[in-house]
């Protein structure tokens, strides 16, 4: 199963769903596809689409999926990595009015450089990216949260 999550951003992200729909129609995606669409309104006979999913159900879906396709939100990416999933990241872009700026490009580039994810910068590349996912071995994710907490605590204690 492929889980597609668009987060809770108040802007549409139809571009990614169009790419997934196209690959289903071309028979390049044969798996069941479940979508957490957030505020993106989309009709499909090929995908099971929910606006929002509660945490428990979302966690169950991530556990069940083989591939997570997500927008470039840090929380969504880390959630997939913490569940040891192959994560394909399509950053939302300002030029398509999918976000206010292009910070998701930098997030995607950083996670890609670290070896955690497969980027999807252009929708036309989805077939190629899905093929790459078959053999992709993501680097084991290590959270930096405890280190950040120590830095903040040291800053507070010393000021």
Image (cartoon, rainbow, N blue to C red):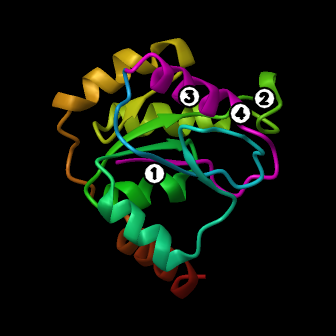
Residues at discs 4 and 1 in contact (Cβ within 8 Å)? no
Residue in front for this viewpoint, 159 or 94 = 94
Tag in front: 4 or 3: 3
Residues at discs 3 and 1 in contact (Cβ within 8 Å)? no
Q: Which percent across, then down, holds residue 99? A: 77, 38
Which residue is rendered at x = 71% and y = 40% of the image? 43
Please tell me whether residue 77 is drawn above or below residue 121 in the rendered image: below
User: Mark 3 Cα within 10 Å, few/some/many (few <14, many 20+)?
Assistant: some
Q: Point out the tag, 2 or 1, that comes first from the N-terminus.
A: 1
Q: Residue furthest top?
A: 124
> Which SS class for mark 2?
helix
Residue to which mark 3 is pinned = 21
Residue in front for this viewpoint, 107 or 135 = 135
Image disc number at residue 94: 2
Image disc number at residue 14: 4
Residue to which mark 1 is pinned = 77
Q: Which percent across, then down, holds residue 104? A: 61, 38
Image: magenta residue range: 1-27
* Quarter of the view holding residue 18: top right
Work out whether residue 143 can be spotted. no
Q: CA distance from mark 3 to mark 2?
A: 22 Å
Q: CA distance from mark 4 to mark 3?
A: 10 Å
């Amino acid at each position: 199963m492929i889980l597609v999550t668009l987060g809770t951003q108040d802007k549409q992200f139809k571009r990614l769903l169009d790419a997934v729909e196209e690959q289903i129609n071309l028979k390049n995606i044969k798996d069941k596809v479940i979508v957490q669409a957030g505020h993106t309104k989309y009709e499909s006979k090929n995908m099971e689409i929910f606006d929002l999913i509660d945490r428990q159900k979302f966690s169950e879906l991530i556990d069940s999926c083989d591939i997570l396709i997500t927008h470039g939100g840090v929380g969504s990416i880390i959630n997939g990595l913490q569940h040891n999933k192959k994560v394909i990241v399509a950053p939302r872009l300002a030029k398509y009015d999918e976000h206010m700026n292009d910070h998701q490009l930098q997030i995607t580039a950083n996670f890609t450089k670290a070896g955690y994810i497969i980027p999807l910068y252009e929708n036309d590349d989805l077939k190629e990216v899905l093929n790459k996912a078959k053999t992709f071995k993501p680097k084991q994710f290590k959270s930096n949260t405890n280190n950040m907490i120590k830095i903040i605590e040291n800053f507070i204690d010393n000021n």
